[in-house]
Image (cartoon, grey):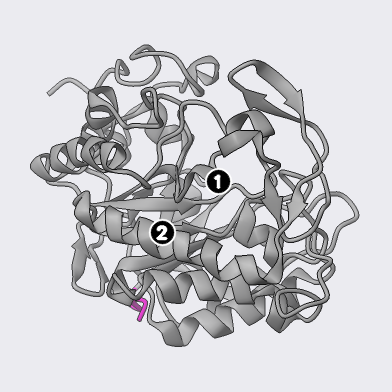
Amino acid sequence: MPNTDRPDLFTPLLLGSLTLPNRMIMAPMTRNRAAKGNVPQPLNATYYSQRATAGLIITEASQVSPQGVGYPFTPGIHNQDQVSGWKLVTSAVHQAGGRIFLQLWHVGRISHPSLQPGNALPVAPSAIAPSGSVMTYQGLQPFVTPRALAEEEIPGVVDQYRKAAVQAREAGFDGVEIHGANGYLPDQFLRSGSNKRNDSYGGTLENRARFLLSAVDAVCESWDSHRVGVRISPLNSFNSMSDDNPDETFGYVADKLSPRNLAYLHVVEAAAAPGAPGCDFAALRKRFRGVYMANSGYDKKRATEALAAGRADCVSFGAPFIGNPDLVRRFREDAPLNASDRATFYGGDAHGYTDYPFLNP
C-alpha cells in the first residue's frame, strides 16, 4: 500500500520486499544504443550504473520477441546473447548500489516489414495503420497496414511476455515493468481507437483489457507480483492513439490490477489531444490500491508537491536523468542541472550518453 505520511522525494519507499532509498525513479527511455542483434553492450552498463542512485531504474523498452521489434538498435530479452548483455548491465548497477527493472515491450503495429522476421507484416489487434513514418535501418519508411492477429494466435503472443520475464530473471533484474503505454501492443488492444475486433479480445471494455491483463498474469507466473509494474498512458496520442472514454477504460484497468498486488502502476499523465476526452488522474490514483508512480514533465517542485499532497507515491523522471546521472544529488542539494542534448537522444556513441559531467565531489 502507498505511504500516507506526506513523504518527499528522498523518503524511502517499500515495493514488496524491495526498499527504494528515494522516490526518484529513472523512467524508461529508448536510446538506440544496443549492439548488433539487439544485444546490450558494455556502454549500456556504464550508462545505467552512472545513474544507480535513482530509487529505481526502469530500463529502456526491450522486445519480448523478434516480432516485437520496432526500431533499430534497441535491446531485446528473447535470446541468450541478449540475456548475457543485460547481465553486464544488472551487475554494474548492483555493484553501484542500485536497483533495476526491465521494461517488457512488444511494439505491435509500430514496426515495418524490414524489421520483422521474414519481412512479415507487423501484427496488431486490428488492421489499422498508424499515421506517419517509422525509423528503419534504411531510414524513415511509411507505416504499413498491420496484420490483425487471429484470435487463436493471441495466447502465443501473451506467452512471449512470460518467456521474456523468465529471461529477465536470468539476466539478474530486480523486477520487470510491462509496457502498456504509448501506442504499443497492449495499448493497441486496450484503447477503442485502435481495437475494432468483435471477438473475445475486442468490442467490450472487458474484452479490450484482456490482452494486457493476460500478459500481467503470465509475467506473474515467474515473478512475485510485487516485482511487476505496469505502465499506462490514458491520454497520450503518440502513435495515432485515442480512446472514446479514458476515465472508464483506465479506471477499469486500475480496478482489475489492484487485487493483483503489483509493485506499482506507472501512469504517463500527458495532456489530452485537442478536442479529445480527458482523464481524471486523481480518481485513477484512488482506484489503484497500490503504489502510484506519476510521470510526464515533472520537475523537483511539481514532484515534491504531488508527493506531499498524496497525488503520487513516487515520480519518474526522463530527460533530466539523461543529462544528469547524479540527478538525485542535484535535487537534494538544489544544484544546477546539466541541459540534456536532444540531438544525441537516439543512437550514436558515448557522446550525449555517458559523458555528462557529475557534480564535483
State the image coordinates of residue 276 (x, y, percent, origin top left).
Answer: 86, 58
According to the picture, the residue beneath numbered tag 2 turns out to be 177
State the image coordinates of residue 127 (x, y, percent, origin top left).
Answer: 82, 53
Residue at the image point whose x is 69% and y is 71% from the top = 151
Q: Nearer the viewer, residue 27 or 227?
A: 227
State the image coordinates of residue 190 (x, y, percent, origin top left).
Answer: 69, 67
According to the picture, the residue beneath numbered tag 1 turns out to be 67
Q: Is residue 128 found left or right of 232 in the rendered image?
A: right
> Where residue 184 is drawn, which disc sits there?
none
State the image coordinates of residue 119 (x, y, percent, origin top left).
Answer: 64, 33
Disc 1, SS: helix
Q: Residues within 10 Å of mark 2 (few under 14, many from 20)?
A: many
Q: Which residues are magenta?
A: 1-5
Q: How many marks?
A: 2
Q: Is residue 173 above or below residue 30?
A: below
Q: Label 2 vs label 1: CA separation?
A: 19 Å
Looking at the figure, which quarter contains the N terminus? Answer: bottom left
Main SS of the magenta part reads: loop
Q: Is residue 2 magenta?
A: yes
Would you identify the image quadrant in which residue 220 lies? bottom left
- The amino acid pointed to by label 2 is Glu
